[in-house]
Image: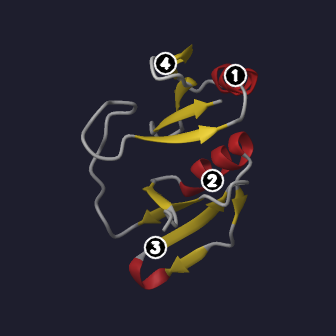
Amino acid sequence: MHIAHLTMWTEDLERLRAFYEAYFGAHVSSTYTNPAKGFKSYFLSFASDARLELMRSTTIAMAEVVPGIQRLGYIHLAMAVGTPEGVDGLTQRLQHDGYPVVDGPRWTGDGYYESVVLDPDGNRIEITA
């Protein structure tokens, strides 16, 4: 068994798609649209074959979440870049481009080298070596 994909709701589908495409090398599927339900989505595929679905709806009221806050439930997406230098470089690039870095880069107590940044919607992304 394996996880087939993870999914995120967003208010700005194009902005979030462009972010994951530009910084994490996502390959984007064609758009799926269901006008009757006010629904639109993309599947983003990564080099490891992992997939992320981004969805937007005009008919569902979304609960507001404070960007970057720790809470119960799914809390972050971890993206492995291969090396500590890769973590440093991508973290610096994201910070330079205005994305908040909320932790690191640093070695964790369990041996990971990582940083934590926020995507445009405030979702936590752990960038690991």
Q: Are marks 2 and 4 in contact (CB under 8 Å)?
A: no
Q: What residue type is labelled 4?
A: Thr
Q: What residue type is labelled 2?
A: Arg
Which one is in front in this view, the residue at disc 2 or the one at disc 4? 4
Q: Is residue 45 left or right of residue 116?
A: right
Q: Determine the residue positioned at 45% across, 39% down.
A: 123
Query: Residues under labels 3 and 1: Cα distance?
Result: 39 Å
Relative image position of residue 23 (x, y in whole percent): 70, 39
Residue 39, numbered circle:
3
Q: 112 or 19, which lies in front?
A: 112
Q: Which amino acid does label 1 sit on?
A: Pro
Q: Are marks 1 and 4 in contact (CB under 8 Å)?
A: no
Looking at the rendered image, the quarter that the C terminus falls into is: top right
Q: Determine the residue positioned at 63% across, 21% down.
A: 95
Q: Which of marks 2 and 3 is nearer the N terminus?
A: 2
Q: Are marks 3 and 4 in contact (CB under 8 Å)?
A: no
Query: Residues under labels 3 and 4: Cα distance?
Result: 40 Å
Residue 84, numbered circle:
1
Q: Are marks 2 and 1 in contact (CB under 8 Å)?
A: no
Which one is in front in this view, the residue at disc 2 or the one at disc 3? 2
Query: Residues under labels 2 and 3: Cα distance?
Result: 15 Å
Q: 123 or 104, which lies in front?
A: 104
Q: Which amino acid does label 3 sit on?
A: Phe
Residue 17, numbered circle:
2
Which one is in front in this view, the residue at disc 3 or the one at disc 1? 1
Residue 108, numbered circle:
4
Q: Is residue 92 left or right of residue 119?
A: right
Q: How is the image coloured?
A: secondary structure
Residue that sits furthest to the bottom in the current view: 36
Residue 56, numbered circle:
none
